[in-house]
Every structure is written in C-alpha cells, then in structure tokens.
Image (cartoon, rainbow, N blue to C red):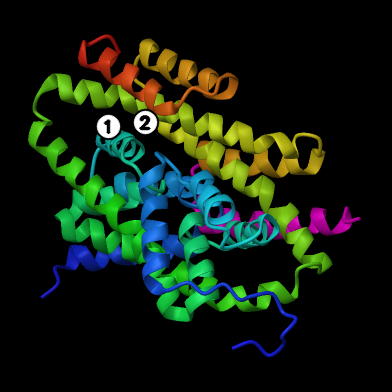
Amino acid sequence: MIPPVLWELMAQFFVLSLLSIGGANAVIPEIHLRAVEIKHWMTDAEFAQLFALSQAAPGPNVLIVSLVGWKVAGVLGGTLAMLAMSGPSSILTYAVAQAWERFRDAPWRIAVQRALAPVTVGLILASGYVLTRTADHSWSAYAVTGATLLLVLRTTLHPLWMFGIAAVLGAFGLI
Amino acid sequence: MSDSAAAPPVLRLTLGTLFFGFLKVGLSGFGGVMPFARRMIVEERRWLTEGEFLDVLSLSQFLPGPNIVNVSVIIGRRFQGVAGSLAATSGLMLMPLVIVLLLATLYARYAEIAAVRDALGGMSASASGLIVATALKLARPIRSSAWQVGVCAAVFAAIALLRVPLLWVLLAMCPVSFGFAWRTRR
C-alpha cells in the first residue's frame, strides 16, 4: 500500500520532469513554489538547507529533487522523487534521439537552439534569485552570496572551498 | 558484424562498461558533473568524438529533464539500446543518490545542534551565489543580441518577481523566442 503523499510527490515531479528545459537548476523556483508555498512540505529555511546539502554531495545537481522527496517521505520518497523526475524526460529523450541525428543541419533546429538559450539563462537566473531570497536573511549572508559569486566568476577556485569557509563562518554564528 | 570492410571499427561497449563508466562520472563532480562526463567520454575512453559529444549535449539541453541524465540515456542507447540507457543512467545516479540520502539522514540526526544548522545556513548562502554565477557565465554568449537579452529578462521577471508558474512562462516565451530566432536566422 503506497501512502497518498508518495503519489502526490511523484505526480509533482512527473510534471516537472517534462517542464525542466535547461535542467534541474532551471526549475528550482518551480520546485520551491510547489514544495514550500503550495504543498507546505517544508519551510523556506529547510528548502535552502536541502539545496545546500544537494550541492555539497557529489553528483548531478538534480539531487535537490531526491532531498525534497526525502524530506516528505524518507529514503523511499527520495528515490521515487528522483525516478519521477528522470523517467518521463528520459523516455522522451530516448524516443527523440534517433530523429535528432537526421535534422543536424536543419534551419529550424538551429533556430530552436538559439531560441532556448535565453529562456534557459533567464530560468537559472531566477533560480539564483529565489535561492538567495530563501537563504539570506542578514547582511552577512548576502555578503557570503556576493563573495561566492565574485570568486566563481573571477577565479578558478573550486566552489567546495567556498562552501567550506561559509559553513565554518556559519557554525561560529558569524552569518 | 559490419556491412562494409572499409567502415571504421565499431566500438562495442558492454552494459557493465557503460554502468561503471557513468558510475565514475556520477562520483566525480559536485553540483554538476557535465565537465567530467565530457572528459571521460571524449578524452579518456573515446566513446565519442568531440563533435559527437557536442551533438549529444545540445540535444540533452534542448529536451526537458536533467541534462546529464539525458546524456546518459542517449549514449547508453547508442551502444546497447534500452538496456544500455538503463545501465548508463543507473550507474550515473546510484552513488550520488546513496550519498546524498546518507548526508540527509546525518543532517536530520544533528539538525537540533545550532552550530550544524548555522553551518548549513552559511553553506546555503554560498550555494545561492554559485547558481547566480552559473547563470551569469551562461549569459555571456547571449549578451550581444538584444532580443535574447529581452527574452532572458522577461523569463527572469515572470518567474522570480511575479512568480508565474513555469508552464505558463514556457508556453508564452518559447514561441516568442523562436519567432525572434527564426526571423534573425542566417
């Protein structure tokens, strides 16, 4: 017997799977909207912390999805959320892969790629904005966000170093 | 085997090779593994040429779904059909899923400790900065085109400021963006 909340969870990510043009990072505002504001599965702060955890673990950035699932229904929830997020889009990709090679130089294909690029960038920018609003509640937190932003753009330092320093500052109550 | 003696030798990958190859990719990066996937597939093991990989990547980005999962589906399919896709994708996701769920379990156990909560709070401030930086890096190639900047700004405003549901934004903005792209095609 599968609890209703698991069906609910899978239904959410089934839909998101087919809307996630630009990958998992592009749908963070939508995940936040559904998980925090519509379904009330967690608070703003919890969402921000789960996102930080998903970035601190090795692997693809879609892991945020399994952490949302985990928050709702434990390890089973985390696994099913990931399957729901990957399943529909994977089936679509499998079906389209064959046809795609035939249209390599078609004008519409090049236009589609140029059309999707700014949509994707807008979506990921929105993700950054929503995450910053969710995570930062003090000037020092905004300073950490800004410092990370600059370091990533200007240096080749691995982001894990910045996460580590931010975690230490946080643990000492400085953020 | 091959229908032509002149054809280049066909690369044969077993399900195990696909599984373990992507297993390694899944473990190699933090907050995104695409650069590591390219290195393994193109440079180290030569499963695909650079051009073939770019083709796979552009299709993966064009279709919905986590991009790296789409890459594993396409490459798995290319070498072993449905079974290959399943092997590649499960190899990719298995260890990251196990590790992140272990981390989450530890987090739940120690979340009452204020220092643990605050450390994660600090990390989430840093992680948001990383995502903004990722977006700005991706924005570099579109900066010189006025309509692309306009589409990007409209999508951002609709999602971030007005909180319009994603489906409506995509239904409205994708055709508009395609219209611009089509009219300015070379």
> Are circles 1 and 2 on residues that touch, CB within 8 Å?
yes
Chain under disc 2: A
Viewer can see residue B31: yes
Instruction: Give the residues in magenta.
Output: B162-186
Q: Do the dots labelled 1 and 2 sit on one chain?
A: yes
Q: Residue at x 44, y 72 (%)?
A: B85
Dot 1: few (<14), some (14–19), or many (≥20) neighbours within 10 Å? some
Q: Residue at x 28, y 24 (%)?
A: B121
| Quadrant that contains the N terminus of chain B | bottom right
- Quick one: B178 or A104, which is closer to the camera? A104
- Which residue is denoted by mark 2 in the rendering? A134
Give the side of residue B43 with respect to residue B131, left or right. Answer: right
In the image, residue A121 lies at what x, y percent? 61, 42
In the image, residue B181 lies at what x, y percent? 80, 55
Q: Secondary structure at mark 1?
A: helix
Position of residue A6 relative to residue A138, above or below, is below
Furthest toward the front, the residue is: B5
- The earlier-in-sequence mark between 1 and 2 is 1
Picture disc at residue A45: 1
Q: Residue at x 46, y 46 (%)?
A: B33
What amino acid is found at the position of numbered circle 2 in the picture?
Thr
Give the side of residue B53 with respect to residue A109, left or right. Answer: left
Asked whether B65 falls inside the magenta stretch, the response is no
Viewer can see residue A132: no
Position of residue B85 relative to residue B69, above or below, is below
Picture mark count: 2
Q: Secondary structure at mark 2?
A: helix
What amino acid is found at the position of numbered circle 1 in the picture?
Ala
- Quick one: B172 or A72, which is closer to the camera? A72
How far apart marks 1 and 2 lie (CA) works out to 7 Å
